[in-house]
């Protein structure tokens, strides 16, 4: 089966086994695995697991950077094999690392992931002055400015960027999204950035942006569904913009079978209320911030979650 390659590729990434990663990726493609599916279900899951080990103190910066490098090289090769008609443009973002910071692995990985989702990337590199971000955004007619930093000593550059966008009278023109190991949610709110992500699982921030950004404005949530892939649960949100008559599929994942959880989107789309409760009943996924998670499909006291693969 094609899916048998996914956990093997993830394991190779976690073990920093570049030779085996290359071999398994090639074998997966020869077996007919879709390149985009390989990126999403194998390579990105693998690097996320490395990130979790880093956060737990089991891996350190050399392991994190090493894993990122081998995954980056693999994804570049896979991207070349994705048919262009499978990638529908959903906007343009200028991406760079702030002045004084020359780390680009995190920025590159996020850029590659966004590009597979139909976001056009304008990569301006590392050690970028705040005006370089803005000038390129204007030249490229971008929708978003994305800035990254790894070092805590360079984090103030993100604040300077937000302030400079305001000074140049462009606050309503560009959304400013920031991220990286040196930033945290409370500080991002303090500096006035429009969005934040330490990793690619910041689903609520992404959803908020998709609903409110001019030109996107996905104001209607058609449905939410969940899939159990054993290694993780995948949530699929089908969004529609009534104003602009376009649609979008948003996917995110949660890990762990004991108490998987994601932030609720009820505050954004009231239609998520019953759907999140149904998913909680059938899959056991908790939606943090939901106003009322009482059962809607099953009765109180029902044991287990019938749509999970481990339900007996």
Image: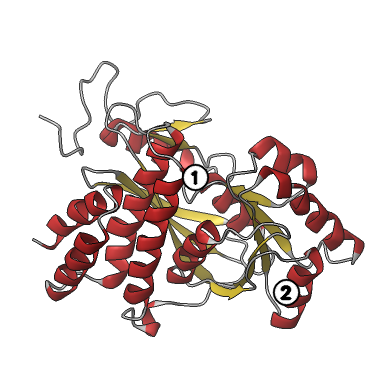
- What residue do we see at 23% from left, 20% from top? 302
Q: Residues within 10 Å of mark 2 (few under 14, many from 20)?
A: many
Front-most of residues 86 and 42: 42
How many marks do you count on the picture? 2
Residue 173: x %, y % from top left: 78, 68
Residue that carries the numbered disc 2 in the rendered image: 137
Describe the element under mark 1 as helix, strand or loop: loop
Q: How is the image coloured?
A: secondary structure
Residue 282 vertical position relative to residue 221 in the rendered view, above or below? above
- What residue do we see at 43% from left, 32% from top? 57
Residue 190 in view (yes/no):
yes
Front-most of residues 171 and 248: 171
Question: Looking at the rendering, in which quadrant would you find the C terminus?
Answer: top left
Residue 57 vertical position relative to residue 170 in the rendered view, above or below? above
Find residue 271 and name its label: 1
Front-most of residues 163 and 263: 163
Describe the element under mark 2 as helix, strand or loop: helix
Q: Nearer the viewer, mark 2 or mark 1?
A: 2
CA gap between label 2 and label 1 equals 35 Å
- What residue do we see at 22% from left, 47% from top? 229
């Amino acid at each position: 089966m094609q899916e048998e390659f996914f956990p093997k590729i993830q394991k190779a990434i976690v073990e920093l086994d570049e030779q085996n990663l290359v071999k398994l990726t090639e074998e997966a493609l020869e077996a007919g695995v879709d390149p985009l599916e390989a990126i999403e279900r194998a390579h990105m899951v693998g690097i996320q697991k490395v990130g979790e080990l880093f956060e737990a103190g089991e891996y350190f910066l050399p392991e994190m950077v090493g894993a990122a490098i081998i995954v980056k090289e693999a994804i570049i090769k896979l991207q070349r094999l994705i048919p262009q008609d499978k990638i529908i443009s959903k906007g343009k973002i200028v991406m760079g690392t702030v002045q004084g910071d020359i780390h680009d692995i995190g920025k590159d990985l996020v850029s590659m992931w966004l590009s597979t989702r139909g976001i056009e990337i304008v990569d301006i590199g590392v050690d970028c002055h705040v005006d370089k971000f803005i000038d390129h955004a204007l030249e490229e007619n971008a929708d978003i400015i994305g800035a990254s930093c790894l070092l805590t000593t360079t984090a103030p550059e993100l604040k300077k960027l937000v302030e400079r966008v305001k000074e140049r009278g462009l606050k309503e023109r560009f959304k400013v999204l920031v991220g990286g190991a040196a930033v945290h949610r409370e500080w991002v709110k303090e500096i006035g950035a429009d969005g934040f992500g330490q990793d690619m699982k910041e689903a609520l921030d992404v959803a908020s942006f998709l609903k409110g950004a001019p030109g996107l404005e996905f104001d209607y949530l058609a449905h939410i569904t969940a899939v159990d892939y054993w290694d993780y649960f995948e949530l699929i949100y089908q969004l529609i913009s009534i104003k602009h008559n376009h649609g979008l599929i948003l996917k995110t994942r949660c890990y762990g079978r004991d108490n998987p959880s994601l932030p609720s989107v009820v505050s954004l789309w009231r239609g998520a209320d019953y759907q999140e409760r149904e998913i909680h009943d059938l899959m056991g996924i908790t939606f943090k911030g939901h106003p009322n998670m009482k059962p809607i499909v099953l009765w109180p006291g029902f044991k287990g979650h019938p749509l999970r693969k481990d339900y007996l």
